[in-house]
Amino acid sequence: MLIREVRITGLVGGTVDGGWPQGNKPEEDLNTLIEVVTNDGLIGIGSVMTSKALVSAGVKLLLPHLIGERADEPARVTEKLRQSCFWQGRGGAVEHAISGIDIALWDLFGKITNQPVSRLLGGNYRTRIKPYGSLLFDEPGPLRDALLATKARGFKAIKLGWRPFGRRDARTDELLIQTARDTLGPDIELMVDAGGSEQFWPHGYKWAIQTARMLANYKVVWFEEALPPDDLEGYILLREHSPVPIATGEVLTRRQSFRPWLERGAVDIIQPDCTKCGGLTEAWRIAWMAYEHNIQWVPHGWNTAVGLAADLHLTAAVPVARYVEYLTPSPYLEEIVTVPFKVDAEGYLNVPDRPGLGIELNREALKRLGV
């Protein structure tokens, strides 16, 4: 079974405001779906957290190395793409495009073999995993309402991120965390994402360590992106002294970029995004590399239902995994598949057990949300 065609669909009309400056967001330009079609008409689906324009350019570059290739050898085929394009993009947007293709090829591999992706990745260490509801900070009143709505949906863990946290003063930061803890009570796990990958992040180690000490008072599970994403030395220092576990990694691409963060102990938790870092193949390699360095791995997942499905299979197929990220509310996660994911009474998600990723796109929803 050979690869015949690649289809690209940009998602519009439901982009979540990711905390961009002054409330601005990319013009509906943050998530793209990829479908890889075989000569027998079988379709594998993937997702990319970047714009349709960049994905289209990346696919155009990669297509001569992809068309006519086997549809059931995802790791070899995507490594061929990576190796063939070193001179035109080691990482970055090219790796993003490879990510979506890789996820789609794993979906195809599962459909061809009639097996779920998690089993093809090596087998199931677990059949369900805890999602954390991922949402944005807001002023105390709206924040309280959003937290209560998320808790009511059954989430037992919630992550808050970005503005206004870290953008005003320490008093505001603590007020927001106190509001969250008072609203959720002591039993809901709470994570905090400062959003240090925002443009021109102004804070360094001193702000980060002082803030970490404050977060420890509220039993925060981890402190994410407290520093700019390239500040390796700062993260090494912060991890050594922070009373709260330190997390980062969502903007890195290619497994080689993750190696120094793991080998030098810069984080307690590494967070590759399989829709950017190289797909399921690279994310699986990074997860095992983290396991060998006794560093927790939690997939970043501010993307789509396709990305969440991929993360569920990944977390099933590695020895130690505790969470997946569940962006909420988001039509790209909750409307674009025929059977939406559902949190059970204990706050867990089941890993899909149908062939491939175990999901099907809702074509009616894509008529509204897809370009």
Image (tube, helix red, strand yellow):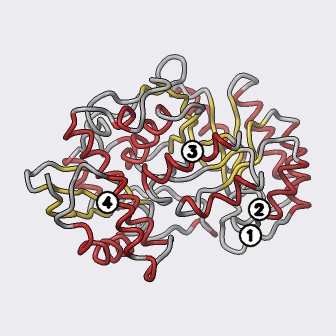
Task: Please tell me which residue is depicted at 82% across the width and 66% down the height of the picture.
Answer: 203
- Provide the residue designation for mark 3: 287
Residue 295 horizontal/vertical position (percent): 70, 42
Q: Tell me the residue at 42%/34% (across/down).
A: 122
Q: For the C terminus, give its image quadrant.
A: bottom left
User: Which residue position holds label 1?
Assistant: 201
Whether residue 36 is situated above or below residue 316 in the rendered picture: below
Disc 3 and disc 2: Cα gap in Å?
A: 22 Å
Numbered label attached to residue 92: none
**Residue type at tag 3:** Ala
Tell me which numbered mark, 1 or 2, is placed earlier along the sequence: 1
Chain-order first, disc 2 or disc 4? 4
Q: CA distance from mark 1 to mark 2?
A: 8 Å
- Left or right of residue 46, residue 157 in this image: right
Name the kind of residue labelled 2 in the image: Leu
The amino acid at mark 1 is: Trp
Residue drawn at x 63%, y 40% as measured from the top left: 291
Q: Secondary structure at mark 2?
A: loop
Asked if the residue under mark 4 is in contact with the one under mark 2, i.e. CB atoms within 8 Å, the reply is no
- Which residue has dot 4 on it? 77
Q: Position of residue 308 (x, y in %)?
A: 43, 42
Q: Amino acid at mark 4?
A: Val
Q: Nearer the viewer, residue 81 or 355?
A: 81
Which residue is the site of mark 2?
227
The reply to whether discs 1 and 2 touch (Cβ–Cβ < 8 Å) is yes
Q: Nearer the viewer, mark 2 or mark 4?
A: 4
Q: CA distance from mark 4 to mark 3?
A: 20 Å
